Amino acid sequence: MKSSTPATLVAVSLLIIAGLLVAGCTTTQQTPEPTTLTVFTAASLTGAFTDIGKAYEAKNTDVKVDFVFDGSQTLRTQVEQGATPDIFVSASTKHMKALQDAGFMDNSTVAPFLGNSLALIVPVDNPAKITGLADLANPGTKIVIGTKDVPFGDYTRQMLDKMAADPAYGEAYKDAFMANVISEETAVSNVMPKLILGEADAAIVYKSDVSKDDRDKLIRFDIPSEYNVVATYPLGILAASPHKAEAESFIAFVRGPDGSAILTDYGFDPIPAGK
């Protein structure tokens, strides 16, 4: 058996070194994980903010937006009990102010950004033959509203107080209306299925709550301005958020042309920055 010559050993060594260099050059670089931005958002914004999140992520691939949708009261309670979102989007100034007063919010970032108002909705087949608010006092009409602690339920009660003060309706109307309430929900997202499945005849929700997917299943009646309640939606960054720069960028997108167009399409009334 012949022994290897020095030239052969050198050649083999060079091949090994070259292979190592090639391997080193072709090592795949790790792509950094995107920053996750947690946004606690009022349930009435589910459709609009889902679309806004997708549009934002398409333009900001280094950020993932993680939404938690629920009633503003529930989300506020979760923050008070230790939840740590980056942004809170409320359907009520009351719940935002409570978090501000308790030191949970970066108050310099809190601002109203959206308006909304109430509407009467019924299933498309309208079994109770409802044509307006007056019919909601008819005996046997099945109505769904929000609990008094969630914004759309609070606003419904404000609407009823306005109607009770008008002799055209009076306290008797308010009493008959409330006697017809079969369910009080903690989030708007729980209301639509009851109407679509025929479990209720009518509901008082926000005008924006009839989503694109449900427009052929529900009928919306506008509520006269003298009885309606205009809801103001504030948003802001949590004081403890570790992602303030990303949170500011997302809020700017929400309030910019792209976000405002989506919100308008869903029936909301964006409030220009600085107003």
Image: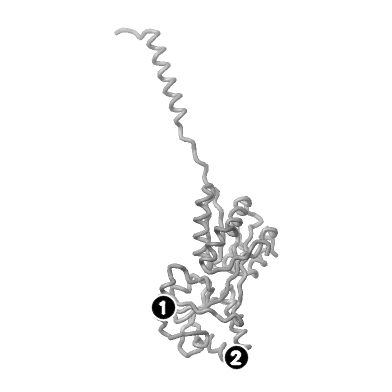
Where on the picture, by quarter, is residue 72?
A: bottom right
Residue 103 image offset from top left, x and y in percent:
69, 61
- Label 1 environment density (alpha carbons within 10 Å; few <14, some 14–19, many ≥20): some
User: For residue 23, which numbered disc appears in the image?
Assistant: none
Q: Secondary structure at mark 2?
A: helix
Residue at the image position 61 percent from the left and 88 percent from the top:
164
Q: Secondary structure at mark 1?
A: loop
Residue 40 image offset from top left, x and y in percent:
57, 61
Along the polypeptide, which appears first: circle 2 or circle 1? 1
Residue 158 image offset from top left, x and y in percent:
61, 80
- Label 2 environment density (alpha carbons within 10 Å; few <14, some 14–19, many ≥20): some
> Is 142 or 219 nearer to us in this picture?
219
> Which residue lies most toward the left here?
1
Residue at the image position 49 percent from the left and 38 percent from the top:
30
Q: Which residue is labeled 1 in the image?
A: 124
Pointers 2 and 1 in contact (C-beta within 8 Å): no
Q: Can residue 150 be seen at all in this image of the molecule?
A: no
Where on the picture, by quarter, is residue 3?
A: top left
* Quadrant showing the N terminus: top left
Give the amino acid at mark 1.
Val
Give the amino acid at mark 2.
Gly
